[in-house]
Image (cartoon, rainbow, N blue to C red):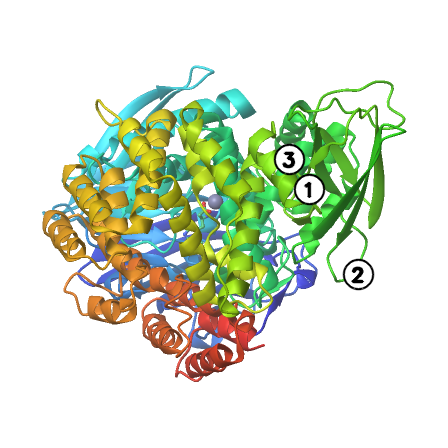
Amino acid sequence: PKAVLLRDYTPPAFLIDSVDLDVDVREKQATIRSRLAVRRNPAAKDAAQPLVLDGRHLELVSVAIDGRALAPGEYTVDEDHLRIAEAPAAFTLEAVVRFDPWANTRLEGFYASKDGLFTQCEAQGFRCITYFIDRPDVMSRYTVTLHAGRERFPHLLANGNQVAKGEEDGERHWAKWEDPFPKPSYLFAMVAAKLDLLEEGFVTRSGRKALLQVYVEPGKIDQAGFAMHALKKAMRWDEAVFGLELDLERFMIVAVGDFNMGAMENKGLNIFNTKYILARPDTATDYDYYGIDKVVAHEYFHNWTGNRVTCRDWFQLTLKEGLTVFRDQEYSADEYSRAVARIQDVRDLRAYQFPEDAGPMAHPVRPDSYVEINNFYTATVYEKGAEVIRMIYTLLGREPFRKGMDLYFERHDGQAVTCDDFTQAMQDASGVDLSGLRRWYSRAGTPRVTARGVYDEAAQAFTLTVGQSLGQGGEPLHIPLAVGLVGPDGVDIPLRLEGDAAASGTTRVLDLREAEQQFRFVEVTARPVPSLLRGFSAPVVLDGGLTDADLTHLMTHDSDPFNRWEAGQVLATRIILAGVEALKAGKPMEVPTAYVEAVGRILASASRDPAFAAECLALPDEAILAEQMEVADPDAIHEARRRLKREIAERYRTRFEGAFRHFTVTGPYSPDANAAGRRSLRNASLGYLMAIDDSTARALTFLEYRRAENMTDTMAALECLANSAGAERERALGMFYEKWKDEALVVDKWFRAQATSDLPKTLDRVKSLLAHPAFDLRNPNRARAVLHAFAGTAVHFHAADGEGYRFVAEQVVALDRINPQIASRLARAFDRWKKYDAGRQAHARGALESIRSAEGLSSDVGEVVGRALG
Ligand code: HT7
Ligand code: ZN
């Protein structure tokens, strides 16, 4: 398949003002009758173009224009299109198509899951429901009538408001829905299913009443309450922070167990993966609750950033995704701990987006080409896109940013627009020049920023020389660099740049706009340690030129919590990477006392902020460490990291045991930041104790496993045991499965704990899990719990004998026949294969070639593998 290019964008030849769908659900067949009001687009490049409608996996029964059935010679149909050469200026197009939703294992378009039929139209799934101009700049008003058996499909839902319903021939019923808002086809949704319903009223800030509904699998209503609570919180937050209200009389959320991604923001009818809805204290962890809160908010926020103002084309995906991720990050920061939320976001960015930007799938946040758009729902478009919005926020400030948002909605409500339209609104509202910032949209790769400070004692001045490079030429980016200067006493020095009238504040955002710039701070009374990139003010790799002693100082004193955490991460990284070299040279690994003592101080002051302390105690992930090496050595990284953890654990065993006892949470379970933070520290302590893995630690962990009353503590103990070869492991895993075998999301946890185990025989275990009666390759959550989880392991996927690569390659091919989107995500595990040694590279190349040569490979997997083999 050919690549689609941003520079080839042209407006659509036709517009479709209204869509009327009649959907008839029968045994193994859906029949869709569409009535489209079509007219030529006055903005089209060429007024004589044929009408080309997108359509896939459809059986065309009939097609008519203005009530006249077209004869076979008047149109052509191929795998992807219906073409009508002679089309009038304005007309009604009627088509009838059929397909079997139960045979749709791709889970895009209209498909069956356990409890009924559901849709997923983003990005290009609507074309699997009916023939259409399936692109986001074609916006239409939709009316939908659904007909289905009453017993099997008691709920018939679509976007907007239900305007009529009724009974028909005995066992069947129907419902008619109208969506008052014009929308692109990717926001279309319908559901015909047997579900339980939780509903509550909501009065918006301006006094409008709305009905909120959460639909879940029958029998699971006791797991729907938190999602409803999260929805209401998100609605209030958007009113308070952005002045944005719900614009609908009814807002529905439907949870489905088979879903390719996390959730989907269809207008008024969000469809969610059950993973981001269902929660009860005994089935969901704190992290699951946090995820639900965030994703429910994210999809709700899309109602304005994505739905009211949408994307002109799919290259602009970050327009809605980057902005909405930024909004959900801010929401989480306000609802939980801002420092911890930022640390987690940056850790994810480094673990997923930085490697993406350094690998074969690297692309700008606004890509300029793609073969399969589904491959571009990436960490770059989402998370780096959110960082770009955050930089705009940092440069403008809170109030001007809000003014920019207001202007964006004022200008573009109801339109399909571009990233440039967004930045223009921000610039016009604030007067801040965003020309250098805009370059972030079109550059792939992670910029390197180098900073060196020189203190002139006589002049009491500190000069910071800062450089940037992206290694591709082009004009420099605008990088907001938040800095502070920490004095020898650990207190921030008031900042006065040369030329300033007076000192102001202790954190300053420097505008790095050139390849190299100098910033001279005056009235610096003692040699400071610079605290650079506070709050991670830009998505860059920083070389701050700091010594271990500087970092230890920052780790203990920096007033910026992010940089306190960061200093510890940089130090731990240095120790582990030096350990890797020592191990390879057959020398002992050294752990500096200053670092160990700084860890001791974290433990000693942990009660001030347990969640933050837990983050500081977490050592850098193996994937992040691998990125720091010229040639990654997964075994040595694993071993050096394990030794450091064990050494800390042995040094502070009593303190960890104390913390484990002290931070116990009493009373009824709540996922709030305070309680979750205490559990997080307690379980981090357990993790350290299990790094010792002696019989005392194992007994304590097994006891904890049996005593735990919530899933957070249960999983913390189970994951520790899953990494231990002791007899407790199989006992706990057996007990867990027996107890939870009927809760799909909990069974996913059971699979995942085994698939990600550090133990030597993990691949054999994974292979045997594929034969487990509960394993189902067609269910994305289950496939992810085993295959994607295994492929994310540092040691077993990258096993030196190539077995991990061969296994995953086979699974990519098997999965591709069922669900190309899920298969191509799995294939992404090979992205960084060139980072490894020659032996591993040879195995990875062989595995990639075996995928590429598989018969009938999808364009999704084809693009990923093609790029990897490059
Ligand atoms: N906007 C939604 C994207 C999405 C999606 C994309 C491709 C295939 C399946 C999908 N399911 C949902 C989710 C979001 O970012 O809010
Ligand atoms: Zn989104």
CB of residue at label 1: within 8 Å of ligand 2?
Answer: no
Mark 1 or 2, which is nearer the eye?
2
Q: Please name whichever residue, 407 or 176, is drawn nearer the observer in this view of the structure.
A: 407
Report crowding for label 3: few under 14, some 14 to 19, many 20 or more residues within 10 A (C-alpha): many
Q: Please name whichever residue, 70 or 264, is drawn nearer the observer in this view of the structure.
A: 264
Q: Quadrant of residue 614?
A: top left
The alpha-carbon separation of the residues under discs 1 and 3 comes to: 29 Å
Among the two numbered marks 2 and 3 on one chain, the one whose residue lies closer to the N terminus: 2
Among the two numbered marks 1 and 2 on one chain, the one whose residue lies closer to the N terminus: 1
Apparent side of residue 551 relative to residue 595 in the rendered image (left or right): right
The alpha-carbon separation of the residues under discs 1 and 2 comes to: 26 Å
The alpha-carbon separation of the residues under discs 2 and 3 comes to: 27 Å
Three-letter code for the amino acid on which mark 1 is drawn: Asp
Q: Which residue in the rendered view is the most extreme toward the top? A: 207
Mark 2 or 3, which is nearer the eye?
3
Q: Position of residue 852 (x, y in %)?
A: 46, 81
Three-letter code for the amino acid on which mark 3 is drawn: Arg
Q: Please name whichever residue, 252 or 847, is drawn nearer the observer in this view of the structure.
A: 847
Among the two numbered marks 1 and 3 on one chain, the one whose residue lies closer to the N terminus: 1
Report crowding for label 2: few under 14, some 14 to 19, many 20 or more residues within 10 A (C-alpha): few
Q: Quadrant of residue 640?
A: bottom left
Q: Position of residue 808 (x, y in %)?
A: 36, 72
* Mark 1, secondary structure of its residue: helix
Three-letter code for the amino acid on which mark 2 is drawn: Gly
Reading the image, the residue beneath label 3 is 534
Looking at the image, is 242 positioned above or below residue 599? above
Residue 473 tag number: 2
Mark 1 or 3, which is nearer the eye?
3
* Mark 2, secondary structure of its residue: loop
